[in-house]
Amino acid sequence: MNFKNLFVLQEKLDHHIETKHTLNGKTLFSNKILALQVEIAELANETRCFKYWCNKGPSEKAQILEEYVDCLHFILTLGLDKNYNEGNFYIHKENLKDNLTDQFLNLYIDINDFVVCPSKDHYQTLFEDFLCLGLSLGFTEEDIEKGYVEKNNINHVRQLSGY
């Protein structure tokens, strides 16, 4: 996955949003953290992995991918906020868990760790665990990158149309 390109695309979107909404110089870290938590919840809801009381299966793969890349937007913007946009991120297959619910809960722990101590190590753990989730959801790196680029373009159009 071309992480450098993803960070560049995210930086352009962030700049567009910050300029349009006169947010330059404002601290948005807490807003972005909460947005990430909400997006992860929306993603979990589409997978229905935790809904033991429901027989309805997960949403279509395309809808789940869209929610997944919404989360990725916020992970990237958090990395940009902290200047953690250099380096590589890896999918550690040994960290894969069979249970999606456990993976979602682990992401919330990662986010909490990053809030308490916003170190590069905590950011890398969050990002890599998120990539593992993508693999568990059946996405390839190509799926994720393509989905991100498509949604990033939509987000630019939304900003231009008064979203």
Image (tube, rainbow, N blue to C red):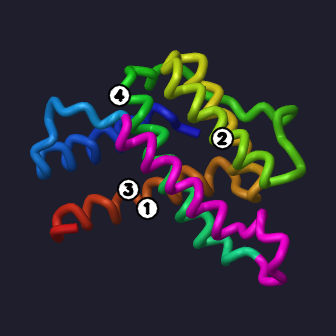
Q: Quadrant of the N terminus?
A: top right
Residue at 65% of width from left, 47% of height from top? 141
Residue type indicated by callout 1: Glu
- In the image, 146 versus 127, the foreground residue is 127
| Label 2 secondary element | helix
Q: Quadrant of the C terminus?
A: bottom left
Residue identified by numbered label 3: 152
Asked which quadrant contains residue 129, the reply is top right
**CA distance for labels 4 and 1:** 23 Å
Q: Which mark is residue 81?
A: 4
Q: Earlier in the sequence, mark 4 or mark 1?
A: 4
* Circles 3 and 4 in contact, beta carbons < 8 Å: no
**Membership of 35 in magenta stretch:** yes
Residue at 38% of width from left, 20% of height from top? 83
Q: Which mark is residue 150?
A: 1
Residue type indicated by callout 4: Asp
The residue furthest bottom is 56
Q: Which residues are magenta?
A: 30-57
Q: Earlier in the sequence, mark 3 or mark 4?
A: 4
